[in-house]
Amino acid sequence: MASKAFLIAITVVGIAAPKAFATDYVVDWALGVNYTAWAEGKDFYVGDRLTIADPTAFATDYVVGDLSGWTLGVNYTAWAEGKEFYVGDRLSTLID
Ligand SMILES: *[C@@H]1O[C@H](CO)[C@@H](O)[C@H](O)[C@H]1NC(C)=O
Ligand SMILES: *[C@@H]1O[C@H](CO)[C@@H](O)[C@H](O)[C@H]1NC(C)=O
C-alpha cells in the first residue's frame, strides 16, 4: 500500500515539475524575422510554451483606391506610396 502511494507521488511530481519551470516565449510571426537568431542563446525545456503572436492582431485594413474604389483612371501606385504592408493586412476595394 505504501509503495503505491509513493508511485503516485512520483508521478504527480514528474508531471508537475516541467510546468513549474516553464517559460513562455512569444514569437512575432512576420516576414524578415531571423528565427535562428531569435532562438540563439535560449534553452528550451519540456513544458515551455511558444506562442506565435497573431499577425492579424496588428493587421491594417486598407480600402484600395480609397473612395475611388477599383476602377479605371486611378493611380494605384500613387495610392500605395508611403504605405507599408505586412502579413495579415487586409485589402479590400469599393466596387460600384
Ligand atoms: C540568421 O541568424 C543566424 C544566427 O545568428 C545567422 O547565422 C544567419 O546568417 C542569419 N540568417 C539571415 C538570413 O540573416
Ligand atoms: C502614378 O503615380 C506614380 C507615383 O506617384 C507616378 O510616378 C506615376 O507617374 C503615376 N502614373 C500616372 C499614369 O499618373
Image: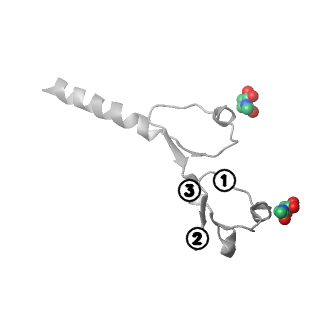
Determine the image quadrant of residue 40: top right
Q: Amino acid at mark 1?
A: Tyr
Name the quadrant of the C terminus: bottom right
Q: How far is the residue under mark 3 from the one under mark 1?
A: 9 Å
In the picture, the disc for residue 86 is 1
Could you tell whether 3 is left or right of 58 in the image? Answer: left
Name the residue located 63 percent from the left edge and 34 percent from the top edge: 39
- Are the two marked residues, 2 and 3, in contact with CB atoms closer than 8 angstroms? no
Residue holding disc 3: 56
- Are the two marked residues, 3 and 1, in contact with CB atoms closer than 8 angstroms? no
Name the residue located 66 percent from the left edge and 53 percent from the top edge: 86
Q: Report helix, strand or loop for mark 3.
A: helix
Query: Would you place residue 59 above or below residue 37 in this image?
Result: below
Q: Report helix, strand or loop for mark 2.
A: loop
Q: Which color mode does the image show?
A: one colour
Determine the image quadrant of residue 59: bottom right
Place of residue 94 in the rendered image (x, y in percent of width and height, measured from the top left): 60, 71
Query: Would you place residue 65 above or below residue 37 in this image?
Result: below
Q: Is mark 2 within 8 Å of ligand 2?
A: no
